[in-house]
Image (cartoon, rainbow, N blue to C red):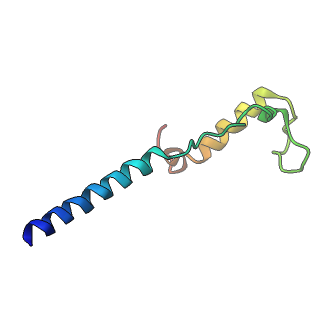
Amino acid sequence: MRGFCVARGLGLVTMWVAVGALAACGERSQDLHSAGKDQPAAWKGTDNGFSAAGWKAGDVQAWDLQLRRRAQGQNEYTRIGGKS
């Protein structure tokens, strides 16, 4: 009787390992297939009123400057007055 229980337990463990292995093989790709292909460059501008004041659409240098300023505004060392 004890040998039967051990064999049955070993069989269940083997089955769960096989199920887990097969589940891992069925994972789908999580890549974005259309990223960047049909989207215009971000610095080209927008048709709505949500752009920064004084920024002209198509101005790459102004776009880069705005991104750097926004990043520095989120930098904790700059916000608390430390050196960065």
Looking at the image, which residue sits at the far right?
47
Q: Residue at x 37, y 48 (%)?
A: 21
Q: In the visual, does 37 lie left or right of 77?
A: right
- Could you tell me residue 68's position as x and y percent? 65, 36
| Residue 64 image offset from top left, x and y in percent | 71, 31
Describe residue 32's horizontal placement relative to residue 26 as left or right: right
Total marks in image = 0
- Can you give x and y, in whole percent of width and height, for residue 77 in the image? 49, 45
57, 30: nearer the viewer: 30
Residue at image location 47% in from the left, 39% down from the top: 83
Q: Which residue is painted at 77% across and 35% down in the image?
A: 42
What residue is shown at x 87% (from left), y 35% (from top)? 56
**Above or below, 67 relative to 48:** above
Choose between 78 and 23: the one closer to the eye. Answer: 23
- Is residue 75 toward the left or the right of residue 2 in the image? right
Residue 5, located in which quarter of the rendered image? Answer: bottom left
Residue 84 rendering spot, x and y as whole percentages: 49, 37
Q: Is residue 13 above or below residue 50?
A: below
Q: Quadrant of residue 54?
A: top right
Looking at the figure, which quarter contains the N terminus? bottom left
Instruction: Give the residue at the far bottom of this rendering.
Output: 1
Q: Does residue 22 lie above or below 63 as drawn?
A: below
Q: Nearer the viewer, residue 40 or 35?
A: 35
- Work out which residue is located at the far left of the displayed protein and give it: 2
